[in-house]
Image (cartoon, helix red, strand yellow):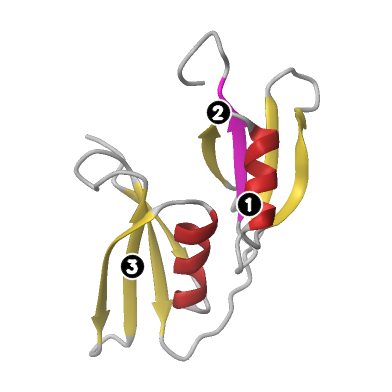
Amino acid sequence: MRLLHTMLRVGDLDRAIAFYTEVLGMRLLRRQDYPEGKFTLAFVGYQDESEAAVLELTHNWGVDGYELGTAYGHIALEVPDAYAACEAIRVRGGKVVREAGPMKHGTTVIAFVEDPDGYKVELIQARSDSPAH
């Protein structure tokens, strides 16, 4: 078994695709309308779906926003330098909601940005002693 994707419902699909591709640097892997179901799916990621987990952005036609609820946490991305990533995201129009710095009660450098629908994306700075956390 392997993790395939995480699905997020978005209010404006083009705005969401622009954030994940232009601000976070993912690629639009595929997009398909389902007229009978009145929804569109778009898959974005850093690698092809055959190689890594991706995000499925679901737009239900006629719905322009959602309540995020209290169970959802965040998406996490590893970055080489969280400070530089925050600056680059800000320059590209992204919203940094927690500046880069050591996590509370730890030493790992993290930051948080927010997508246009309010979903949190955590940036975790890669440790020089290991490729992943």
- Residue that label 2 marks: 80
Q: Residue furthest left?
A: 50
Neighbour tally class for label 1: few under 14, some 14-19, many 20 plus, Cα within 10 Å: some
Q: Which mark is residue 89?
A: 1
Q: Earlier in the sequence, mark 3 or mark 1?
A: 3
Q: What secondary structure characterizes most of the magenta part? A: strand
Residue found at x 70% / y 46% = 87
Q: Secondary structure at mark 2?
A: loop
Residue 4: x and y in percent read 29, 46
Looking at the picture, does residue 71 appear above or below residue 81? below
> Mark 3 or mark 1, which is nearer to you?
1
Asked if residue 40 lies left or right of residue 49, the reply is right
Where is residue 118, by image quadrant? bottom right
- Residue that label 3 marks: 42
Question: Which range of residues does the magenta coloring cover?
Answer: 120-126
Residue 18: x and y in percent read 48, 67
Q: Which mark is residue 124?
A: none
Residue found at x 50% / y 86% = 63
Looking at the picture, does residue 14 appear above or below residue 133? below
The span from disc 3 to disc 2 (Cα, nearest Å) is 27 Å
Q: Secondary structure at mark 3?
A: strand
Q: Amino acid at mark 1?
A: Ile
